[in-house]
Amino acid sequence: MKTIRRVTFSALAAAVLFGLGACADMVAQDKATSIDAGAGALGVETLPDGSSVGTVGGAPVGGVIGHDVGKK
């Protein structure tokens, strides 16, 4: 059981590091778009009776909001 936890944690840590590395050369508007898309998906998922359809719908809505907010 400890081995499975270690492998899972290592895989998760590697995914996070690679994901953050991919965002290194993004402009501010792209960062705002991706962050708000994730926030929209998670925000809808955490609502009572959150469904996968709501999550898929919340991501683009959050992305559009982040795209507009990220403009300067």
Image: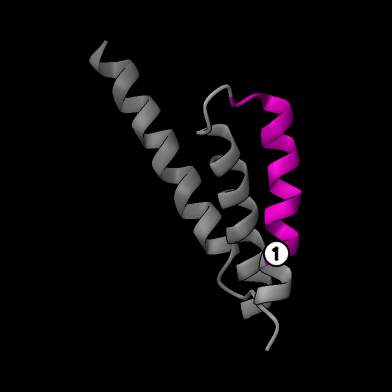
Image coordinates of residue 45 in percent, x first then y, are 57, 33
Q: Is residue 55 above or below residue 22?
A: above
- Residue at the left extreme? 2
64 is within the stretch colored magenta? yes
Q: Residue at x 69, y 46 (%)?
A: 59
Residue visible at 74% across and 28% down? 53
> Residue 56: x percent and y percent?
73, 36
Residue 27, percent across and down? 65, 79
Within 10 Å of the Cα at label 1, are there few (<14), some (14-19), or many (20+) other Cα atoms?
some
Label 1, secondary structure: give it. Answer: helix
Q: Main secondary structure of the magenta part?
A: helix
What residue is shown at x 54% (from left), y 54% (from top)? 19
Query: Looking at the rendering, which quadrant does residue 3 occupy?
Result: top left
Give the residues in magenta: 50-65
In this view, the residue in front, 20 or 35, is 35
Q: Which of 10 and 39 lies nearest the eye of the viewer?
A: 39
Residue holding disc 1: 65
Q: Is residue 63 magenta?
A: yes
Expressed as whole percent of the image width and height from the top left, the position of residue 51 reads: 65, 24
